[in-house]
Image (cartoon, grey):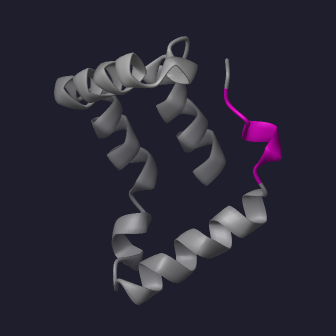
Amino acid sequence: MKTRQPDINRETLRAALNATSKQRMSVEILQEKEKILRTIQADAVMGQRWERYCKDNYYANDIRFDNIVDVLIDLVR
């Protein structure tokens, strides 16, 4: 997998997500983050968009959309 997950400061990410959700008055929605990410993962259109992105950005060629979402879910747990 070609992600930089080890370089991500989880506490900083968590604080940023919480601050953004408070500012946008969407704290309740954030409670459903894993469900929302799984819905995105199963969405065919989102998968197609990722494929187009990979075609335009060579560095993403070997990264599968499922892997991206799995990493995001791991990060927000």
Q: Nearer the viewer, residue 74 or 24?
A: 24
Residue 40: name its quadrant.
top left
State the quadrant of the N terminus. top right
Q: Residue at x 63, y 40 (%)?
A: 74
Residue 71: x %, y % from top left:
60, 35
Q: Nearer the viewer, residue 23 or 73?
A: 23
Can the viewer see residue 77? no
Q: How many numbered marks appear?
A: 0
Residue 12: name its quadrant.
bottom right
Q: Residue at x 45, y 47 (%)?
A: 34
Can the viewer see residue 44? yes
Q: Residue at x 66, y 63 (%)?
A: 13
Q: Is residue 11 above or below residue 25?
A: above
Q: Is residue 63 above or below residue 45?
A: above
**Is residue 10 within the magenta segment?**
no
Relative placement, left or right, of 2 versus 76 is right
Residue 73: x %, y % from top left:
54, 42
**Is residue 7 within the magenta segment?**
yes
Residue 72: name its quadrant.
top right
Q: Residue at x 37, y 36 (%)?
A: 38
Which residue occupies the extreme left position in the image?
A: 45
Residue 70: x %, y % from top left:
54, 31
Specify start and end residues of the magenta stretch as a single range: 3-8
